[in-house]
Image: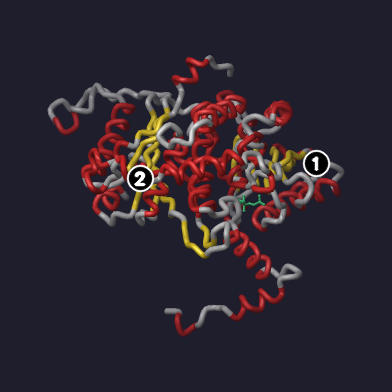
Amino acid sequence: MKMTEEQRKAMRITVDYTNMTDKYLGDKGYSAKQLDSYKYTAKVAHEYVTDNRGKDELFMGWTELPYNQKEIVADILETAKAVRKKFEYFVVLGIGGSALGPTMAFNALCHLHYNDLPKSKRKGPKFFVEDNVDPVRMKELLDIIDPAKTCFNVISKSGATSETMAQYLIISDILKAKGLSIKDHMIFTTDASRGNLVKISKELGGVKSYILPDGVGGRFSQLCPVGLLPAAVLGIDIKTLLQGAAYMDKLCRGSHDFRKNPALLCATLQYAAMKDGKNIGVLMPYSDNLRYVSDWYAQLWAESLGKNVTLDKKPCNVGQTPVKALGVTDQHSQVQLYTEGPYDKVVTFLSVTSYKEKTPIPHGCENIPDVSFLGGHTMEELIQAENKATAYALTKAGRLNYTITLPEVNEFTLGQLLFLFELQTAYAGAMFNIDTFNQPGVEAGKKATFALLGKHGYEAQKEELDQADSDPAYVV
Ligand code: PA5
């Protein structure tokens, strides 16, 4: 969708950090002077990210995704059109960064009961993201899809992730058994040249494949074919999603003053809080559509910042544990802890100014004031009031919180939000002077799985793992 500058401004997302400051939090909040003490750190982080934009060798290729995919987007739109025409089901096989993005965009921008809608009311095929190897889940997926009418998008940068490749083996076996061609039913999204899916594609005579660019790691890949193809299949306007990302990039690129740069502001607030021992970061969207943004963000934040060594090889143990919460649902489960428990958290609210539905609450129960006051309002007013009330209660209790507001949930605002979080993460990593883009801790688990399942070359580790079996003396 082409947008005017006015329309873009009206859809600009904002960050309100009043409740991080001493204005209402007193000595539990930050004074202007305290925040100013992070000015230099923020400036250096901004310079690091700006200077290294687009560098594949540093895994910073994701910064250019809003700009360098014209031909890929055109190709994706063509493929998506064909997929919509031919298939009734679209199944993503992937995990981690190869799954959370597609899930998040699906939930944010499609009908919340999309798969239950009749075909005429859906823009695309029924949609599933299979990001686990729970055997029950795989079996039960197969109970409800017809492989002959399904397109499987196998997403794996390495093509060596046990979960995804096990799924690939199962599905390709089923397709073969049914006399269906893998080439007709699968699309790969993978590394340009090195991954195993590249080899498999060659062996099969060329499976339609999209490239997960070299300088883009899994958790920064939502805005490349990893996320764009599934989104396009669902009828999501991927051009506007990318425009939203570019808009946020523009807002952040030019200024190393954290008070003028939304992503640098969020990074600085979180960094300051982490330095003060706030090791838990709660992300609490007041929108069911944004629910899975928390899952996506949790991976981005945890995997990027959870590190034990700095870039100059000094030991450290940094990071912040991301917690997913949903407003208002989790007001009735977790907010008690946030308000009265330890002072170890920062709560980030995601608020929405205008929901796509207002849903009026009718008058009724006029003789029961506890109920009748609700009549005449809308559910939009109710959720917004509860959002404001929770922020107020936390602030009253001296708890750090800030709010990111989306004027609406749409492609343009989601693109902005994703890019804000990606930049925030890159800035925060630079503040800690760590490698934001590696994940040795994840790799360690992947390798241990290889060993346990008898992969060649992992024999010594298998032996070590066998010896580390639990001691019956400690099993109750
Ligand atoms: O962010 C990451 O790099 C990881 O979460 C990966 O996306 C995940 O482990 C899947 O890896 P791959 O795409 O190689 O299958």
Q: Is residue 209 left or right of residue 254?
A: right
Q: Dot 2: few (<14), some (14–19), or many (≥20) neighbours within 10 Å?
A: many
Look at the picture and state if 380 lies above or below 226: above
Mark 1 close to ligand 1, CB under 8 Å: no
Q: CA distance from mark 2 to mark 1?
A: 45 Å
Name the residue tied to disc 1: 207
Residue ID for mark 2: 347
Residue at x 45% of width, y 33% of height = 261
253 above or below 398? above
Considering depth in this image, is 125 or 92 the residue closer to the camera?
92
Q: Secondary structure at mark 2?
A: strand
Tag 1's secondary structure?
loop
The structure residue drawn at horizontal position 71% and vertical position 45%, both measured from the top left corner, is 214
**For the view shown, which residue lies furthest in the bottom direction?**
473
Image location of residue 45, percent across then percent down:
51, 44
Q: Residue 133's spot in the image, x, y percent? A: 60, 56
> Is residue 142 something one can see in this rendering?
no
Q: Quadrant of residue 3?
A: top right
Q: Nearer the viewer, mark 2 or mark 1?
A: 2
Residue 351 in which image quadrant = top left
Residue situated in front as seen by the camera: 68 or 182: 68
- Amino acid carrying mark 2 in the image: Val
Q: Would you identify the image quadrant in which residue 119 lies? A: top right
Given the image, on which type of amino acid does mark 1 rest? Val
| Image coords of residue 224 (percent x, y) | 65, 37
